[in-house]
Image: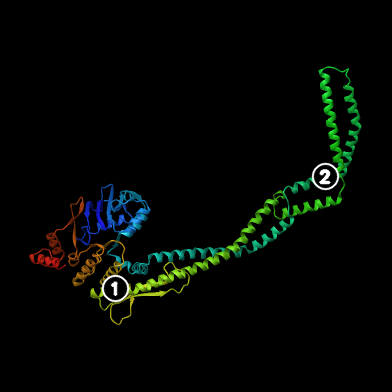
Amino acid sequence: MLKQITIQDYAIVEALDIDLAEGMTVITGETGAGKSIMLDALGLCVGDRADARTVRPGARRADITAIFDVGALPQAQDWLVERALDLASGECILRRVVGADGRAKAFINGSPATLADCAALGKLLVDIHSQHAHQSLLRRGSQRMLLDAFAGAQKQVAKVTEIAHRWRTLSDTLERLTGKSEADTARLDLLKYQVSELNELSLEADELQQLEQEQKQLLNADFLMDSASEALGICEAQADQLTRLRQLMADERHDGSAVTNIREMLETAEIQFQEGRRELLGYTDSLERDPARLQWVENRLENIYDLARKHRVMPEQLMSHHATLAEELEELEGGEHDLERLQGELQDCHADYEKHAGKLSQQRAKASKQLMAQVSSILTRLAMAHCDFQIVLSKRTDERPDAAGAESIEFLISTNPGSAPGSLAKIASGGELSRISLALQVAAAECATAPTMIFDEVDVGIGGGIAEIVGELLSQLSQRVQVLCVTHLAQVACKGHHHLRVSKSGDKSAIFTHVNSLSEEERVEEIARMQGGVTITDSTRAHAREMLSAS
């Protein structure tokens, strides 16, 4: 439950420190005194967006702190523990700071937090029903969410939504790939042909360079053989001369270091000359005239050059081009398998959706009967016994998975016996819609998990004996959850266990809001004031005491 809220420099509040208790707390005050300011400030702590205009004029920032007792809330405790947000004696402290420049910060138990975290935790701690709740009730989306909350089907709704989004993603991907595959059919055929002829060519690494070298040698075979043979003949003629030269210098009569060097060089020259002669002999023997081989080499090179021109690449780039085309072909052929896989996944996803959407439909059907019965019972107490409230679940004609489930949901109402039910927006008047909204909120609150419920002037458009019943309903609700109620009706205010009065003071330069907890006598005065009249008489006070004692 909400234990305390502290507000500094927010709107027309300079400083407020409000302690709250279990049961039903009513908040009253003159029109314009700022009864809803406390609830608006609390909304900032639980995830509402901030606005620099909410900072009190002349102040640097607005600072709001809300302290909740979560000792009996295991779900909230688990949420905090999972995020390493330490608990202090079973308390959870939410703080929001809004600067005059519009920048805002949020804290949970002293640690910086995101707005999304504050909102997620806030849903476990407090449920706020604004005075405009009946307006949102006109939207089918709000009606669906209310029924799902009453059914306790939030987890199933989240599952259905997740599967529907996954189906949509798979469907979009499949549609895109299907369109792409049609456009790529011609490309795929071309690639198959190109890769096939390159595979048939089967060009090997360095083969082009080797072929060009061999072609050059075969084309010059006559010259090479003649010149090599002539060179070999010269070697044979000079070999004896080199041997004779070495023998002349080997005579012992030649002496001295200079001769020694000459002998070594001549010996080395003779050795190298003999090695060169042998290499030349081998080279000469390897040379031959081979027209058939030359023709094959030239044909092979022509095939390589032709394919290079055909693919508009240099001959030496043909192998890398072949690898690129083969890789693209593999990807396109793999895409065909992806289409088959995606089609299978899409079918499985659709079956999964039907399974979980079916469970959600069962939960909704069961909950709708219970909610209709409870709302009808409450409407009877609110002097709308002839009102026929219905919840219609219509199966969607579109078989594609929808994030909202397999059916559309609409709340219908008939306020006159025998008339056909119609939408709330067309049938219910403002006062009737307020009572219907309240009946729905009270009925749904029976299934609420938040320990604190706040009603901000939900009794607008209601008066007389009906207002007293509204007060009784809220008081009854406060037996299981903490209820805070901003009201302008004495019949509702007298049902509260605690009473806060909001007032304002100031002059032309500044206005300030104050909140006071009322004693029994002060409650009498406030209830008497709320009953109307410029002057509060003893009879008005007596009536106020009677109302309080009867509550």
Task: Using the image as rendered, state which of residue 242 and residue 507 is in the foreground.
Answer: 242
Q: Residue at x 20, y 52 (%)?
A: 512
Compared with 327, 356 (above or below) is below
Classify mark 2: residues with Cα within 10 Å, few (<14), some (14-19) or many (20+).
Answer: some
Q: Could you tell me the amino acid type at mark 2?
A: Gln
Classify mark 1: residues with Cα within 10 Å, few (<14), some (14-19) or many (20+).
Answer: some
Q: Is 547 displayed left or right of 356 in the figure?
A: left
- In which quadrant of the rendered view does residue 72 lie? bottom left
Q: Is 164 displayed left or right of 8 in the figure?
A: right
Residue 178 seen from this side: no
Q: Could you tell me the amino acid type at mark 1?
A: Gln
Give the quarter of the figure containing the N terminus: bottom left
Helix, strand or loop at mark 2: helix
- In the rendered structure, which disc, 2 or 1, sits on the residue that comes first in sequence? 2
Q: Residue 217 location, x and y as percent?
A: 82, 44
Task: Using the image as rendered, state which of residue 375 and residue 189 is in the foreground.
Answer: 375
Q: Is 149 displayed left or right of 2 in the figure?
A: right
Helix, strand or loop at mark 1: helix
Q: Residue at x 35, y 56 (%)?
A: 78
- Contact (Cβ within 8 Å) of mark 2 with mark 1: no
Q: Residue 41 location, x and y as percent?
A: 27, 55
Compared with 394, 453 (above or below) is above
Compared with 449, 254 (above or below) is above
- Dot 2 corresponds to which residue? 217
- Dot 1 corresponds to which residue? 374
Q: Residue 92 location, x and y as percent?
A: 30, 53
Q: Residue 76 location, x and y as percent?
A: 33, 57
- In which quadrant of the rendered view does residue 410 lie? bottom left
